[in-house]
Structures are given as structure tokens and as C-alpha cells.
Image (spheres, rainbow, N blue to C red):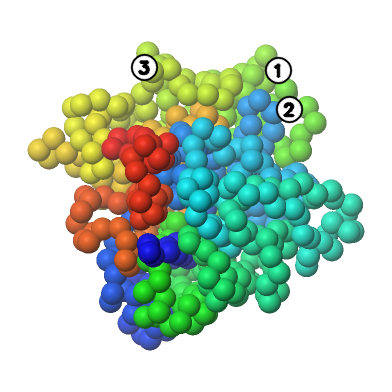
Amino acid sequence: MKKGLVLAYVDSMRTDMLELAAREGEAPTFAKLLRRGVLVPDCVSSFPSVTPVASAEIATGVASDRHWISGMNWYHRLERRYVEYGSSFEATRAFGLFRALYDLIYNMNLAHLSPEVDTVFESLDDAGLRTACTPFLIYRGRHRHEVSLEGLIRRAVDVSGLKLRHATWGPKELFYGDLYASRRVPCRPTSRPGTVDEYSACCAADLAAQGLFDFLLLSLPDNDNYSHRHGPDAQVDSIASADRAFAKLIAAAGGLDGFLTDYALILMADHAQTAVHRELPIAADLGERWTVLQPSEDQPEEAQLAVSPTARAANVYLLPGDGSQAEHDEVRLAVEEMEGADVVAFLSVGGEPLVRETPGPPPPTAEVVARRAGTELRFRPGDAVTDLRGGGWELSGDPAALDLEIADGQVRSESYPDALGRLWSALCAPHAGDLIVSATLGYECVDWGGTSHVGGGSHGSLHRGDSLGPILFCGCGPQSAAERDQWSLRDVAPIVLEHFGLDAADRSRVTQLGART
């Protein structure tokens, strides 16, 4: 009988902090797994390297040009409004509690996530396997779940009169804090940041004790909240907490030997974090020269720009502006001159910047223009050079714009891993901005609630510090990390499906473009 598989995800976990916690005895279960498994220390995240984008990449095996999730906050060109997934409590209040919750709970999975790609839950559900998930942003599956309001969200609904009554579609067993529970478990539900790991582990342990899943996505998100507050160098404490939570699943499955007899494991992070010391108030700065769309604006037709801060990155959209449209070159120059703006990138067609009025893919002749510190590089898919993931590219301009090294027909960047593929997919995504900004190390964009994580840690940029995290395979996946020149979040879904023996035809929707992106 085929082993089951647990995909355990620790939000924002850095490889060096995982190894330090293991060495110091603070994460004994993870330490034992590190000795038994194959560790990839530098798996590349999405861009922007934030949880909604990364979670969609993990669950679908494709990048944002195909899964369509573009950040913590993005502008919906058809609905002429911002989509906010919870950058901060203050940002959620700025957009309205009901609207933000509705986007996070329902729309992310059932409207914003592309219907043209399958999640691992959908693929495994279709194969008759028993799927399960604890609170994870992307959970779309084939099973209907009714709302079971509890805890803080129930009290908020009672006080405000919000109507959170819609069913959702997820894996066979779905636990989503105060909102969804597919069965009764001896676990106190919570959706409050920093308190989810214990609930998640309790649900997983109960399922394991009863043998109720073949595939489980175990989400341990509290490390992210702790690292945001205390900085990434303090992660040993929060990784130790995640280890204790994970150990509850191990104990319920008969101890480590019993667990590894019955289950394969993938332990991973979605991205890392870097320390932030300065704010980048990109929306406020652009608002000094142009009319920037505000949260919950009732006259969006008057705005010239929409600005979507997404931690250490941002999307900027050029809008009609009631007949007075901002000029692309002027906006781009204003962004480049901001202290804290590192890489600024956009699409160009025929040598002119592309401004998209509706969602959708760019023309086939489009190229990416990436600018940094007065240098400029243009690139598009082609066959002049090959990146570490096997993608081919045509380049013109200065490779220094992305710190590229080119040797023997192969291109790589130590500072900005998988830079070409990640920028290409981010800018070709249907909801991408007309400009994408990646912040300089130490800077974070101020969100629409006026807050940042200055004094703590953050992520989102193209830089390696935000973008490289661990992925550990035990009983599945590669025999050696050297099997690939560069690993990516996009490799996870195909490995999950392969573990359960789904053939290439079954996997085609999640592996298409795997060689190039």
C-alpha cells in the first residue's frame, strides 16, 4: 500500500534559523528529520515573495501568470477596486472588515484563483484519495463545506451583522479556524495571528489518530507573525514552537518511526524574511503628484493611479484618471527616485511601456524591462541563454540590472534568484501592475492601514534574503538536492502528485511550463 504524504509548511522559516534551532536542541523533531531526509536549503519563492502568491504556487505548481494571485493587495481592473487579503489589521479596517474577509475567505479560492489550473487537492480528490488541510490560504478542492462560525469571527459577525454564510469547496477534511470544520475535533478554533499552530496541530493529530487522510497539508503559520514582530534573527523561538506543534502529529501517528513508516513528508517554508529598518511610503509619495485611488473610494474613475503595497514589493497601476492619465515614464522615474526602491520593472511592446486597461495576458511581442541604479535590462523568452531552471531567454542591455552572471550560455543571479522567470510571470499575471517595485534591503512599503513591520522582519522582494527557504523531503521527491540546479515552489505540487502515482496526463495542468518557469 502506498504511503500517505504530509506537506508541512512553516511560514517564513529561514534555513539558517531552522538549522540553528536544530543544532541548539530547540527543534528536536525537525533535527531528526534533517538527519533522515534530503534538504534543499535554497528553494526559490514566488515574486512577490508573500504568502498568498507563494501558497497559490505551492498548491498549483504554476506561477502567478497562470494562478492569477498577485500579492497581499492588488487592484482589480474590472471591478475598479483594491483586493486586500489582510496586510495588517489596520489595512483590513481601511478597506472594510466585510470586504476584506469576503476576499480572503471566499474570493481568493473561488473567484481570484484561476479556474484553469487544478490545486493538488482537486487532483487528488479526483483520484479518489482522502485529502485534508489545516488553515492554509489556498485550499480549493472538490468537497463542499458549510460555514461553522465560532470564536472571534462569530462574535464579530454577531456584533456587525456580517453575512458570512456561504459554503466553500475544499479538501475532504478542511479546518479553517473559526469558519470551517469538516468534523468535530477536540481543538479550540482560532484565526488570531500567532495562535494558529496549536489548533492546526491538534486537528492534524486527531485526523492521524483515526487514519483519516492520505494527503495532509499541515499549516504552521505562527513563525511569520513572530518574525514580523521580533525580526528574523529571533526565529529560533518560533521554530521551536512549530516543532512542538508538529511533534503532536508525530505522537498521534505512533512516534517518528511509525510516522515515517506510514507517511512521506515534505517540510518547507513559503519564503524567508529579512530585517526592516525604514519605511517606503510609496502610495503617499505618489499621491503628492497624482490622484491615487484610496481604499473604499466611491468615485474610482477620478483616480490616476492605483498603488498596491505588498510588504517589500508593490504594484503600481496607471488608470484613465477621468481623462487625465499619468505618463508611464514620469511615474516610473518618480518611483526609481524613491529612497528604498531597488528593482523597478514593467512590460514593453515595440519599445513603448505597456499600460493594460483590462486583465489578461500581454501581447506575444512583450518584453520585460528591469531597471536598477541607472542600469537597464530587457528580456523575453527565447533561446540565447538558459537559466538554472532550464528556461530560455533573449537579453539586451546591462545584465548588472539584475546582478546576472552569464557563462557558457547559462545565466544566474546570486542576488535575485530565478530573476528572469519570476519577473516574467509576475508582470504577465492578469492582475499585475503596470510597474512592479522590489524594495531595497531594510525597507518595507507602508500598507494602506499606514503600518509596516519596521523594527522587525518582512518579505516580498525579489532579493535572495526574502526569497530562499528550506524544503526537506523524507520518503518522497529527490534522492539528492543536486538533482536540480535550482528548486522552486513550483516543484512541490508535481512531486506530491507523482508520489501518489498520477501519470503525466493527470499532472499536465500543473506541470505545463515547468521547464520554462
Please, is residue 7 above or below residue 397 in the view?
below
The residue lying at 32 percent from left, 66 percent from top is: 475
**Is residue 353 visible in the rendered structure shown here?**
no
Tell which of 101 and 180 is nearer to you.
180
* Residue on which the image places disc 3: 365
**Residue in the image at 24% along x and 31% along y:** 392
Q: Is residue 44 left or right of residue 165?
A: left
* Image position of 402 with respect to 330: above or below: below
- What residue is rendered at 43% in x and 64% in y? 4
Query: Dots 1 and 2: beta carbons under 8 Å?
Result: no
Residue flagged by tag 3: what amino acid is it? Thr
Q: Earlier in the sequence, mark 1 or mark 2?
A: 2
Rendered view: 498 above or below 27: above
Q: Secondary structure at mark 1?
A: helix
- Whether residue 498 can be seen here: yes
Residue 67 is left or right of residue 169, and the answer is left
Outermost residue on the left side: it is 408
- Disc sitting over residue 322 in the figure: 1
Place residue 5 in its image quadrant. Answer: bottom left
Secondary element at image label 2: helix
Residue at which label 2 appears: 300
Q: Quadrant of residue 226?
A: bottom right
In the figure, 434 relative to 103: above or below?
Answer: above
Could you tell me residue 234's position as x and y percent? 46, 74
Q: Amino acid at mark 1?
A: Asp
| Three-letter amino acid code of the residue under disc 2 | Pro
Query: Which residue sits at x=31%, y=44%?
Result: 418
Gap between marks 3 and 1, in whole Å?
Answer: 29 Å
Nearer the observer, disc 3 or disc 2? 3
